[in-house]
Amino acid sequence: MTATDRQLDQRLEREILQLLERRGPTATICPSDAARAVYAGDDDGWRALMDPARRAAGRLVAAGQVEITQAGRPVDLTTARGPIRIRRVH
């Protein structure tokens, strides 16, 4: 992993936490929210950051800071298929 990769990972993790902090305690975000915020471009280039954003969410899950949900219920990111949401751990 390069220094640039680590910086991107850290930016995505920070962005996820900041987005959640700005919302209510039970609010959720989509990994695409973080990807779009970090990319900050006008085109669809943020889509390339979707997998890194999901991995960042996974690291935050491992750290006990967030959980991954589908249909409002916690799920395991490694087995979840389809759209996911991220929320702070209550």
Image: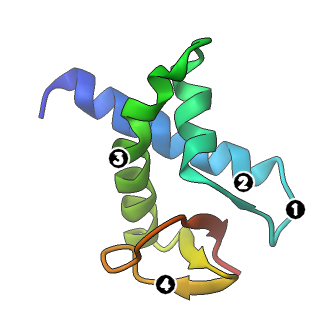
First-in-chain label (1 vs 3): 1
Marks 3 and 4 sit apart, C-alpha to C-alpha, by 17 Å
- Mark 4 vs mark 1, foreground winner is 4
- Mark 3 vs mark 2, foreground winner is 3
**Quarter assignment of residue 65:** bottom right
- Three-letter amino acid code at the position of disc 3: Asp
Q: Is residue 51 left or right of residue 61?
A: left
- Mark 1 vs mark 3, foreground winner is 3
Residue position for label 1: 24
Name the foreground residue: 70 vs 67.
Answer: 70
Contact (Cβ within 8 Å) of mark 3 with mark 4 = no
Residue position for label 3: 51
Marks 3 and 2 sit apart, C-alpha to C-alpha, by 19 Å
Percent coordinates x, y for residue 79 in the rendering: 33, 80
Residue at image point 82% right, 47% down: 22
Residue 20: give its label.
2
How packed mark 2 is, by other alpha carbons closer than 10 Å (few <14, some 14-19, many 20 or more), is: some
